């Protein structure tokens, strides 16, 4: 009977818990610890540790009993090459190494030596090596992993040498189905496409004598110095079987007219008849460089050539107006994801007849589109399958559309950053049954403590489902709003109070008290950002220390009084919680946007 009980405990309860809950259960009793260590950990085949950044000792302790792993995801913000090398091996078929700020390219040669059975590899690295050293290590990795089906290599930094992937085309395994590289020169990308074309044709001839399938790349994602007609034509000519194409460029100067993207390049995308996902984005920080040679006619040609698209993402098309964007909505009948960035001519008219065309829309992102108003949101409200609505920096969005938003029964993510919504508008959201989990009011200057009270105190669904909340850059937010949050938001795990100048030590005390009231059923905060909360004093350190905030993984403290005592604060808090990441660099939650600039001292 005891064996049966133990088996039921492991199979029906423990194996359904995530790693953090398993660790908590193991601390309850010797019997539960034994069940976790002997029955659960060895049976795990996949482990995702991207939610926090462990140091080497913690990582080794966690992985010691996980002998059956086939898939491993690590947040490497505080890990060295030696630490990574110590946990990988031939048992792994899938490996994701994220935010590797301390790991140089020698980890590539280690992967090639230790992981010969790898099928999927994702690696995010800071720019720490010369291109020649990187190329040598990359070649060793590719030669040592002949079965790779998915490869994603992102090198990040201020002035990354885009020649790092020069040799990649000579070593890519023929099993590859998905490829993502950042950064890459346009000229190198064209040579890479020519390599695919040669390999594909050779294999096709061989296929006449052998039943083995030809080389086929189905997903391609590149961050380049330039997107041009030459590049698009090379891609479509070499990879007509593409299902997903994601291209982003960051030109340092305005491209010449004969070396830019025009109608010709867009129309050639029609050769990829299986294409269902397309992303074309031009990102130029502090420079007014865009796809100036594309207007509505170019998007008309695209919409006619690629009617099977289910996901469209376009950024940097300032000359395209309502007519062009509407043609995509009407031509692509199975469109589920629609994202437009920086479209200064996009207005409500593009969505006038959206229900007659794209009722299948599940995700809509309209970022920095100044002509979009509440009228567009009212039309989108008729798309009842919407799960995500992002209206970031659309400053003409007002309260008048919030009743429509509140009727979207499947909506789980809402971004109203910079919108002109007010405290009164919060009543509609607060009383609704919309199951929002991620919510941003960043920069909404007309929403104050009273609005947060309307949002969370009206017994609507949102107070029970909300897990991520961004109240950054809101001058009307003070300790009173935090009191409302701690009282009503039981599921909250991520909170950003960035640049909320009226948030004081009392808010930290309230959050700490919420953490310790486990009998109330509140989840523990995982990430907290108080960057530039200038009213905080070092006295709040006592509330940030044990036993409060037991589940905290990430804490942003930049431009506060803590920053002046960085060494003391880091020593005190990280000694108590070795898994906690303290960020003084101004990153967003989790350091998703600036980890490549971190140094060991900042960890």
Image: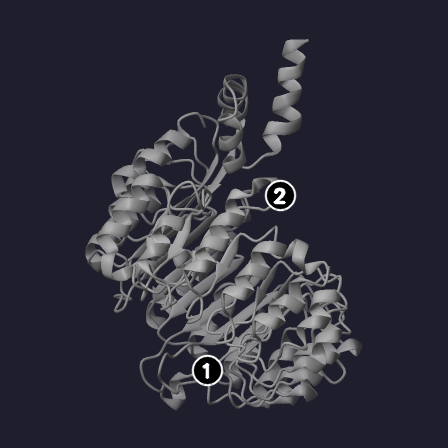
With respect to residue 215, does 380 lie above or below?
A: below
Q: Please state if 38 lies on the left or on the right of 352 as rendered.
A: left
Q: Position of residue 588 (x, y in %)?
A: 42, 63
SS for dot 2 = loop
Q: Which residue corresponds to mark 1? A: 261
Closer to us: 537 or 340: 537
**Mark 1 or mark 2, whichever is nearer to me:** 2
Residue 337 x, y percent position in the rendering: 63, 67
Real-space Cα distance between discs 1 and 2? 55 Å
- Label of residue 521 in the image: 2
For mark 2, does the 10 Å Cα neighbourhood hold few (<14), some (14 to 19), or many (20 or more) residues?
few
In the foreground, 212 or 107: 107
Q: Is residue 413 visible?
A: yes
Model colouring: one colour
Question: In front: 39, or 532?
Answer: 532
Within 10 Å of disc 1 (Cα), the crowding (few <14, some 14-19, many 20+) is many
Is the residue 344 above or below the residue 482 in the image? below
Residue lying furthest right: 356
> Seen in the image, is 586 located left or right of residue 339?
left
From the viewer's perspective, is 183 left or right of 338? left
Q: Is residue 600 above or below residue 36?
A: below
Q: Nearer the viewer, residue 227 or 76?
A: 76
Residue that sits furthest to the top in the current view: 1
The disc label shown at residue 437, or none: none
Asked whether residue 140 appears in the rendered view, the answer is no
Disc 1 vs disc 2: Cβ atoms closer than 8 Å? no
Q: Residue at x 56, y 87 (%)?
A: 370
Quarter of the view holding residue 197: bottom left
For marks 1 and 2, the one nearer the N-term is: 1
Residue 542 location (% of width, % of height):
36, 49
Local SS, label 1? loop
Viewport quadrant of the N terminus: top right
């Amino acid at each position: 009977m005891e064996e049966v009980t133990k088996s039921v405990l492991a199979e029906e309860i423990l194996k359904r818990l995530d790693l953090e809950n398993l660790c908590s259960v193991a601390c309850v009793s010797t019997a539960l610890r034994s069940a976790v260590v002997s029955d659960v950990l060895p049976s795990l085949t996949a482990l995702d540790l991207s939610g926090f950044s462990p140091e080497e000792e913690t990582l080794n302790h966690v992985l010691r009993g996980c002998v059956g792993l086939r898939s491993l995801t690590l947040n490497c913000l505080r890990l060295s090459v030696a630490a990574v090398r110590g946990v990988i091996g031939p048992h792994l078929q899938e490996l994701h190494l994220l935010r590797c700020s301390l790991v140089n390219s020698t980890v590539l040669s280690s992967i090639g030596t230790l992981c010969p059975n790898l099928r999927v590899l994702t690696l995010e690295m800071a720019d720490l090596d010369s291109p020649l050293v990187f190329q040598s290590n990359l070649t060793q990795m590719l030669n040592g992993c002949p079965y790779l089906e998915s490869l994603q290599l992102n090198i990040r930094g201020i002035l990354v040498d885009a020649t790092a992937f020069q040799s990649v085309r000579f070593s890519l395994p023929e099993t590859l189905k998905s490829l993502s590289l950042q950064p890459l020169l346009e000229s190198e990308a064209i040579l890479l496409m020519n390599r695919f074309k040669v390999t594909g044709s050779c294999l096709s001839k061989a296929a006449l004598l052998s039943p083995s399938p030809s080389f086929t790349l189905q997903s391609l994602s590149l961050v380049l110095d330039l997107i041009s007609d030459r590049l698009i034509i090379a891609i479509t000519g070499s990879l007509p079987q593409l299902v997903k194409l994601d291209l982003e460029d960051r030109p340092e100067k305005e491209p010449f007219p004969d070396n830019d993207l025009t109608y010709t390049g867009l129309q050639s995308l029609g050769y990829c008849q299986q294409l269902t996902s397309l992303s074309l984005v031009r990102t130029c920080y502090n420079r007014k460089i865009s796809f100036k040679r594309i207007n509505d006619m170019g998007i008309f040609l695209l919409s006619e050539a690629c009617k099977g698209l289910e996901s469209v993402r376009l950024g940097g098309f300032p000359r395209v107006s309502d007519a062009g964007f509407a043609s995509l909505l009407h031509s692509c009948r199975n469109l589920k994801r629609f994202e437009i960035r920086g479209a200064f001519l996009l207005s409500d008219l593009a969505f006038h007849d959206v229900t007659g065309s794209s009722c299948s829309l599940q995700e809509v992102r309209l970022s920095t589109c100044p002509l979009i108003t509440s009228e567009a949101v009212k039309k989108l409200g008729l798309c009842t399958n919407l799960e995500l609505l992002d209206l970031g920096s659309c400053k003409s969005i007002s309260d008048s559309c919030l009743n429509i938003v509140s009727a979207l029964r499947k909506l789980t993510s809402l971004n109203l950053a910079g919108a002109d919504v007010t405290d009164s508008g919060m009543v509609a959201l607060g009383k609704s049954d919309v199951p929002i989990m991620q919510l941003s009011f960043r920069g909404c200057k007309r929403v104050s403590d009273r609005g947060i009270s309307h949002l969370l105190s009206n017994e609507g669904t949102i107070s029970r489902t909300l897990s991520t909340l961004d109240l950054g850059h809101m001058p009307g937010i003070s300790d009173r709003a935090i009191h409302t949050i701690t009282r009503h938001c039981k599921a909250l795990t991520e909170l950003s109070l960035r640049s909320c100048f009226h948030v004081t030590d009392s808010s930290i005390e309230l959050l700490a008290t919420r953490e310790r009231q486990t009998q109330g059923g509140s989840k523990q905060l995982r990430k907290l950002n108080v960057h530039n909360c200038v009213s905080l004093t070092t006295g709040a350190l006592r509330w940030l220390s044990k036993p409060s905030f037991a589940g905290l993984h990430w804490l942003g403290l930049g431009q506060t009084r803590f920053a002046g005592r960085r060494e003391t604060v880091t020593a005190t808090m990280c000694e108590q919680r070795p898994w906690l990441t303290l960020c003084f660099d101004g990153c967003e939650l989790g350091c998703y946007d600036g980890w490549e600039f971190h140094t060991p001292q900042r960890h």
